[in-house]
Image (cartoon, helix red, strand yellow):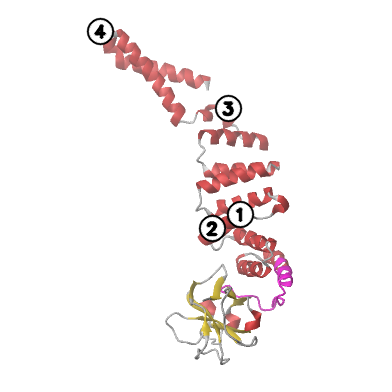
Amino acid sequence: MKLFLVITIVASLLLLAFVLRPLWSRARPLAIALGGSGIFIALALYWILGTPLALDPAMRRAPATIDEAAAQLQARLALDPTNADAWRVLAQTYAAQGRHDKAADAASRAATLKPNDPDILVAAAEARALAAPEHRFDAQGLAWLDAAIARNPHQQRALWFKGIALRQAGRDADAVAVWESLLPLVDAKAAAVLGVQIDAARVAAKLPPRDHANPPAANGVQVRVAIDPGVDLGKLDPSTPVFVIARQIGGPPMPVAVEKHMLSELPLTLTLDDRDSPMPTARLSTMKTVEMLARISRSGSATRGDGDIETAPVRVDLPARVPVELHFGK
């Protein structure tokens, strides 16, 4: 750093001596003033816009320890606190040191600076959970995970942590839906580990065991069907059929996938996939976009009839990596 200052001053003096030489004989005080101002401005501009720390041997050297890495990152962020990636790396460094509170703060800074980056949002949610009692995801962490999934429905770590957060909140069926949507995205080894968690969540949610022989297809769609609070469906028998339907948009009325359940099963979480396709020539996995709805059928038929009650249809782009919500509302 000192050597740089000396070189800068000498170079500036030589340049200014050449430029200001015509003034030396006629206006020496003015030349001296201009020369001094020029050197000061050059140093000030470099200090503000340049990277003085890059000239420090300690900053040029690769960190030998985690403590050195943290010190270097802190020094860089002192000069440029808007560097979201540096905040994220600092958060990882703090986490490696076991300083989870500081890691959560640094990761939060990164998420604030880059709120549309799914990877940074997931890292912030994870850091916040690690710093929390019992490593629980709070509302802010869950919001970051939801934002990450909205921007990248294939973000595997976001889906994994979302399932954990849902289980922590006692929403086991929802966790099953999220984790089963993650299954087609991971390799065999990860799928085996994930399958254990799904099976445990299914038991907690009192759902039937998975069909291991026929796993969901890659284009399988997780669906949650529920009745909104305060909705009066009349005096319907609990055994009244409820059909969950996926159909082509603007196509024939025959569903490309359908499951039949009973009213007493609601709220219900299920997976529609090729196993539910009534026509072998029009499977769900061959579709790019479908329309989904649920229907309470008074007649017991999947075909719409008088007095049937339907949810609002939802357009779904395939493959869908987040559950589709179908609600019988007012």
| Residue 185 visible within the image | yes
Which badge, 1 or 4, comes first in the chain's sequence? 4
Q: Which is more N-terminal, label 2 or label 4?
A: 4
Residue under circle 1? 141
The x and y percentages for residue 314 are: 49, 74
Q: Is residue 204 magenta?
A: yes
User: Outermost residue toward the top?
Assistant: 25
Q: Find residue 26 and name its label.
A: 4
Q: Residue at x 50, y 87 (%)?
A: 254
Q: Are marks 1 and 4 in contact (CB under 8 Å)?
A: no
Q: What residue is shown with label 3? A: 57
Reading the chain from its start, which is encountered first: label 3 or label 1? 3
Amino acid type at circle 1 is: Gly
Q: Amino acid at mark 3?
A: Pro
The alpha-carbon separation of the residues under discs 3 and 2 comes to 41 Å
Q: CA distance from mark 1 to mark 2?
A: 10 Å
Give the spatial CA distance, label 4 vs label 2.
68 Å
Could you say whether the residue bearing mark 2 is in a helix, strand or loop?
helix
Q: Is residue 287 visible?
A: no
